[in-house]
Image (tube, rainbow, N blue to C red):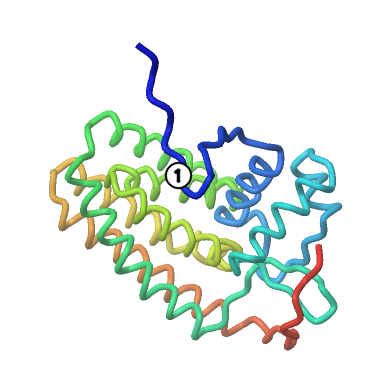
Amino acid sequence: MDEPAAPHVGGLGPVKRYDTLADRAYGQLRQALMTGSFHPGQKLTIRKIAAVLGVSATPARDAISRLLSERILESDANRNVFAPRLDDNKLHQLYMLRLALEGLAAEEGAKNIDISVIRDLEIIQMSLIAAMDRQDYQRVLIENERFHFGIYHQSGNSMLVEAIEHLWLKLGPTMNLLYPSYNHSRKGVSAHLAIIEALRSRQPLAVRQAIEKDLQDGEAELRVALAKVEPAPARGRKKASV
């Protein structure tokens, strides 16, 4: 017996979708922003992004355009494109959301996590500490992202994780300001170890509290760092052309 035809709505039928070079470039650029590969306010050009991603200008332009339309990347009146930069007020707003969303994702993830994932988190944490010891802060930020989302994905709530990713896209470049001073205090390391201990003890609320403490310490350090950075020049609101 033949399969029934897929339903059509308004004359539209299902379309098979395959990842394009533009999709992959967009995904890699998102990941680079989340893990601090760019510094706050850093100028991004199509040529530079294309070279870093190993693609032609067209996929790079499409990836940049998508992130501009999502209001992740910024632009000025001269149509230059920049990595996002936060002031003290935006930082505070962003961390209010991080505390609410990431605390929830951590608590829900802790309810579902198994011992193999906890062991993976311990390996990630060892890699993070080793990167700190050799002052490889780019690797620290990469491992930090792997650690946090390794927990959040366990929540099983893809919409929640997507909302958190959006915040990290805006925050990622500014996370560079944590180092090297945050390396000296090792507060982030202590917080991650407390998170692992709470996970092993099967205490979801304690996991949430440890995640929130990690975020609060990071925000406090970033506030100090931002106070030392000169204000960015005003930028026009003209739409960028990439």
209 or 104: nearer the eye? 104
Q: Residue at x 58, y 35 (%)?
A: 17
Secondary structure beneath dot 1 equals: helix
Q: Amino acid at mark 1?
A: Arg
Percent across and percent down for residue 160 are 34, 56
The image shows residue 183, relative to residue 50, as above or below, that is below
Residue corresponding to mark 1: 146
Relative to 142, 123 lies left or right: left
Quadrant assignment, res 114: top left
Report the quarter where the N terminus lies.
Answer: top left
Percent across and percent down for residue 46 are 82, 55
Percent across and percent down for residue 57 are 84, 48
223 or 93: nearer the eye? 93
Q: How many marks?
A: 1
Q: Residue at x 50, y 74 (%)?
A: 222
- Res 8 seen here: yes
- Res 129 seen here: no
User: Tag 1: Cα neighbours inside 10 Å, few (<14), some, or many (≥20)?
Assistant: some
Q: Residue at x 74, y 84 (%)?
A: 235
